[in-house]
Image: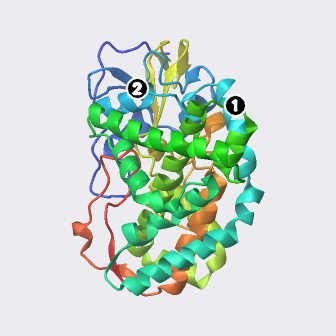
Amino acid sequence: MTTTPAAPATTLPAERGSCPFAPPPAYDDARRTEPVKRMSLWNGEPCWLVTGYEENRIVLQDRRFSADARNAGFPFLSPGRRQLLTKAQPSFLRLDDPEHARLRRMLTGDFIVKRAQAQQPQVQAIVDDVLDRMLAKGEPADLVRDFALPVPSRVICLLLGVPYADHEFFERTSSVLVDLTTPPDQVKQAQGEIRAYLDELVEAKRRHPDDTLLGKLVARGELSQTECAAMALVLLVAGHETTANMISFGMLALLRNPEQAALLRAEPERIGSAIEELLRYLSVVHFGLPRTTLEDVELGGQLIRAGEGVLCMISAANRDESLFTDPERFDITRDSRRHLAFGFGVHQCVGQPLARVELRSALGTLLRRLPDLRLAVPDDQLEYRTDKAVYGVREMPVLW
C-alpha cells in the first residue's frame, strides 16, 4: 500500500479528446496505469479519481464511502454544484442508509421491471405521437428538441403527475441545475423557482389525491412537504435529462456505425443488447459518481484518508479491458450487461427499468419508421454538452 502523495496532479474534470463517444484520454490513461489516482478539483482541493472497473464497484457498494454531500471532503465539480447539493433538502440520492433506504423503498414498487414493462404500451403511444409531430413539422428537425427531449419528459410527467403543459419551465430550470458553469446565485434562483412550483404541486395533491406516483407519495403521509418536493425534483430532473440524452446520443452512435444500425434493423430482436451496449459505450453521466470517505480505506494500493473525496468515473470503468474485449469498439452483439452506466450498489439508479423501456421504444421506432434518417449537417458542426452533468449532443439536425 502506498501513502497519500504530497500534492495532487491533473485537474478534474479533464478535457475530452477527438472522439465524442470516448471518455477523456486522461481517464483512460489513469485506468491503465493508476486506477486509483490523486488529482485536484477546480478549486485546488484534492480528490481521488477511480477509473478501474473493480475499484468502481468496490467504492459504490462499500458503506465507508458516503454519498451525502454534507460530509467533509465531498467532491464538488463547480461552485454551482456545491450550491445545488448542500443548500436545500437533500434527495435520497444524497443520503446514506438507513435514511436513503427508507425513502428509496417508497419508490421501488413503481419502478420494478414488471411495472415498467406494463407501461410499455403507454410509452410506445407517446413515442409514436412525438414522432408523428416531428414528421408533420417537416425536415430538417432537431432530434434533440423535437423527439429525444419530449419523449421522456412526457413519460415522467405522466408517471409523476406533473402537468406536461409546464414542461418548458422544468426543462429550462433543469438545464440550469445540471450546467457546471452556472454561477451559485443562478443555481439558487433556479432551485427556488422549481421548489416553489413543486411545493404547490404537492399541496394540490394533498387537496385532490390521485394515483400518480407523487399523489401516492403524498397520500402515504410519511413525508414532509419539503421531502415530497425533494423527491419529486430528483425524479423529474433525472427522469428526463439522462434518457433524453441517451436517445439522441444513442441515435448518433448508430448513425456513426451504420453496419450496427443495419444489423439492428435486420434483427430487431437485438434491441435489448443494443441498448446495454449503448449504455456502456456512451455512459452519459460523464463526470462520475461522487463519494467521500467516512474512515481510512485502502483501495487499489492507495490509502484514502477519512474525509477525502472520491470520483467514480464510470465512463472509464465501462471501457475497462479486463471486462470488455476491444472496449473502444461499438458492438451490439457483445454482452454488456455488467456495465456501470446506472451505478452499482444501494444507490444504483432506481429508474433504470423504465429508462430501458423508453430507450427500446424510442430507438427501435426511429430505426423502423425512418430507415433513411441522417444528419442534416456535417459531423464536425455538432456541439456536445461537455459543460453539463449529463453528456450528449446539444442539437442534432436530421433529415429522413
Give the structural element (helix, strand or loop) at label 1: helix
> Residue at left 56%, top 34%?
93
Counting other residues with Cα less than 10 Å from the Cα at mark 1, is it few (<14), some (14-19), or many (20 or more)?
A: some
Q: Toward the viewer: 234 or 353?
A: 234
- The spot of residue 164 in percent (x, y) is 51, 61
Q: Nearer the viewer, mark 2 or mark 1?
A: 1
Q: Quadrant of residue 117?
A: bottom right
Up/down of 288 relative to 321, above or below: above
Q: Are marks 2 and 1 in contact (CB under 8 Å)?
A: no
What residue sits right under mark 2 in the picture? Answer: 75
Give the structural element (helix, strand or loop) at label 2: loop
Q: Is residue 139 left or right of residue 220?
A: left
- The spot of residue 8 in percent (x, y) is 30, 21
> Residue at left 49%, top 83%?
132
Look at the image and name its color scheme: rainbow
> Residue at left 64%, top 46%?
205
Up/down of 264 relative to 344, above or below: below
Whichever of callouts 2 and 1 sits on the residue coming sooner in the sequence is 2
What residue sits right under mark 1 in the picture? Answer: 101
Confirm whether residue 11 shows in the render.
Answer: no
Up/down of 73 relative to 14, above or below: above
CA gap, disc 2 and disc 1: 23 Å
- The spot of residue 42 in percent (x, y) is 27, 29
Q: Extreme front residue here? A: 207
- The spot of residue 262 in percent (x, y) is 51, 82
Residue type at mark 2: give it.
Pro
Q: Toward the viewer: 152 or 348?
A: 152
Q: Toward the viewer: 58 or 189?
A: 189
